[in-house]
Amino acid sequence: MPLDFPAPPKESIVSLNEGLGRLPARNKYAYRTEAAGGEQPEVSLPHEVFVLNPEQITAGKGVADAKPVSWRYVLNQPTGGALMENSATATAEVVYRDGAHIFSNLQHGWLANATRRAIDVAAKLPAVQAGSFDLRVLRIPAERVDSLWLKNNTTNADIVVPIRSAIDVVTAFQPYSADEFLSKIREHLAMKEPFDDRPKNFQG
């Protein structure tokens, strides 16, 4: 398989299962806990999430300086049919906090589907087909950019595939080299007007 999915820590899996068990029995997206009669969800595509903040990017830092913050999982729960459209699809995240793994959230719909689509794009890249890459997620929260980070296991030629982007300098599902991706983000940050917190009647 061209993409490697590193095994998450056992503590993260335990927290994931405990967190899913504590969810409300049912919600508007049709996901149901096992206690409420829902089927056990299929957990797949585990990936570690890393955060890089704008200050680091502006200072010229690279993806190697990103901080690990959580593990995220894609869930699929059958809701009465074998087809994917008859399933409740979600992502679940388990964060690191004070040395512990803590269940954080369950997010339905678009994020899981977009993650799957980005992985499909990544898996078909010639460089990925010929090489060995760990699947990670790189998050720039202040800019609302989430991307697959394909960590090259043999060279420094990492690849980034945005899953979502609230800024127009990078495009979702478009592959970039890590250097090109961060260069575009850096250019965007340089063009942003600095936040002015002075009183509106300030004349200085």
Image (cartoon, rainbow, N blue to C red):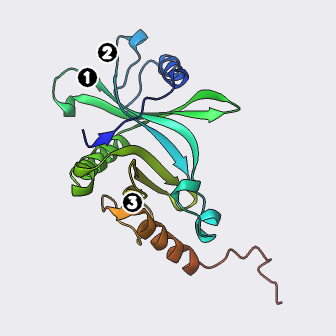
Taking depth in this image into account, of 59 and 21 the one nearest to the observer is 59
Q: Is residue 21 found left or right of 130 in the rendered image?
A: right
Instruction: Give the amino acid type for the residue marked by disc 2 in the picture.
Output: Glu
Real-space Cα separation, disc 1 to disc 2, in angstroms: 7 Å
- Looking at the rendered structure, which numbered label has been put on residue 157? 3
Mark 1 — residue? 78
Marks 2 and 3, the one that precedes in the sequence: 2
Badge 1 element:
strand
Name the residue rendered at 39%, 12% in the picture.
34
**Foreground residue among 64 and 160:** 64
Nearest the camera: 199 or 59?
Answer: 59
Query: Residue 96 placed where, x, y %?
Result: 61, 34
Q: Position of residue 78 (x, y in %)?
A: 25, 22
> Is residue 167 visible in the rendered structure shown here?
no
Q: Earlier in the sequence, mark 1 or mark 3?
A: 1
Image quadrant holding the C terminus, namely bottom right
Name the spot of residue 111 as percent of width and height, x first: 38, 44
Q: Amino acid at mark 1?
A: Pro
Q: Please, what secondary structure does the residue beneath circle 2 have?
A: loop
Going 72% across and 76% down the picture, which residue do you hit?
Answer: 196
Q: Is residue 55 left or right of residue 75?
A: right
From what the image shows, is residue 2 above or below residue 58? above
Q: Are marks 1 and 2 in contact (CB under 8 Å)?
A: yes
Per the image, the residue denoted by label 2 is: 39
Q: Residue at x 42, y 54 (%)?
A: 147
Which comes sooner in the sequence, label 1 or label 2? 2
Q: Nearer the viewer, mark 2 or mark 3?
A: 3
